[in-house]
Image (cartoon, coloured by chain):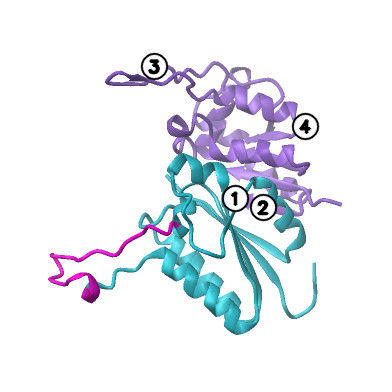
Amino acid sequence: MATKTLNIIESAYRATLEEQDDTIVWISSALRGASAEVDVLLEGSAVNYAVRGQDATGLALGTWQQSQPPRLDHDIKNLMDKGAAVFFVADDAAERGIERTDMVDGVQPIARRDMAQLFSGYGRIWRW
Amino acid sequence: MNDSKKKTLTFAIMDAPFESARSTTAFRLMDAALRRGHDVRVFAYEGAVALTFDKQAAHPNAVHGRDAAEEDHPLPKDQVRALQALAKDKGCTMEWINCGLCVDERGVGEAIEGTKRGTPGDLWKWAESSDNTLIIPTRG
């Protein structure tokens, strides 16, 4: 039986314009596609990935224009549609003034004091 | 978990060459594992795929007042080769897979011998069949 893995995403908005996604959200989705039991915990500034309606359009450099900007809230939703649970650290969201109603449906708040309990449900914890 | 003395350890690394000390730290951990007789697997993701790019070239350093030979600039591809040789010497295996899409977007497909291109699915298979997996992500 496959070991459940929790990918913790802490390093936020690293090269998201270059990659047109977040690389750890992406690899989590790819691993799901490979039948891996992978869930995600958004921590620190990465809690913002779940905020609905982010708009990264408009990057233009000379005559070059980005046609497929990152759509992180959609990527989070698509990851959940593949069966992954997506958690976020509620304390980190509160510190940043992010309300639950600002976030895409389905993401699950976890209080920082409850993280250890969450971890106990996984065989692997991968902090990215 | 395999309880035999010889272990299989998987590393996932992300940093590009010459950007941080994390790659060197990862290599030192691999060196230590191989010296203890363990098998090592490396999944290189994002910028780390350039660690094995075969066209890396040493350069002179005028500030140091040394030509290329004297400078003997470290190249990660040579360090990986050295780890591969250490593995062979110790009777261990050192497998290396570069994320294929990451290779393509960087144009670093010409990798040293003993490395392969693959997918995140390979990381998962390795994690499932290894004694442990260490993730060394990039930051910033």
Residue pointed to by mark 1: A127
On the image, numbered disc 2 is attached to which residue? B123
Which residue has dot 4 on it? A83
In percent of width and height, residue B127 lies at 71, 57
| Residue A96 visible, this angle | yes
Q: Nearer the viewer, residue B86 or B124?
A: B86
Q: Which chain is cyan?
A: B
- Colour chain A appears in: purple
Disc 4 from disc 3: Cα separation: 32 Å
Label 2 vs label 4, nearer the camera? 2
Q: Could you tell me which residue is drawn at 73 percent across and 38 percent down?
A: A32
Q: From the viewer's perspective, tell me whether residue B93 is left or right of residue A70.
A: right
Residue at the disc numbered 3: A58
* First of labels 4, 3 by sequence position: 3
Same chain under badges 2 and 3? The reply is no
Q: In which image quadrant can residue B24 be found?
A: bottom left
Q: Quadrant of residue B57?
A: bottom left
Mark 1 and mark 4 residues within 8 Å of each other at the beta carbon: no
Q: Secondary structure at mark 4?
A: loop
Marks 1/4: CA–CA distance: 20 Å
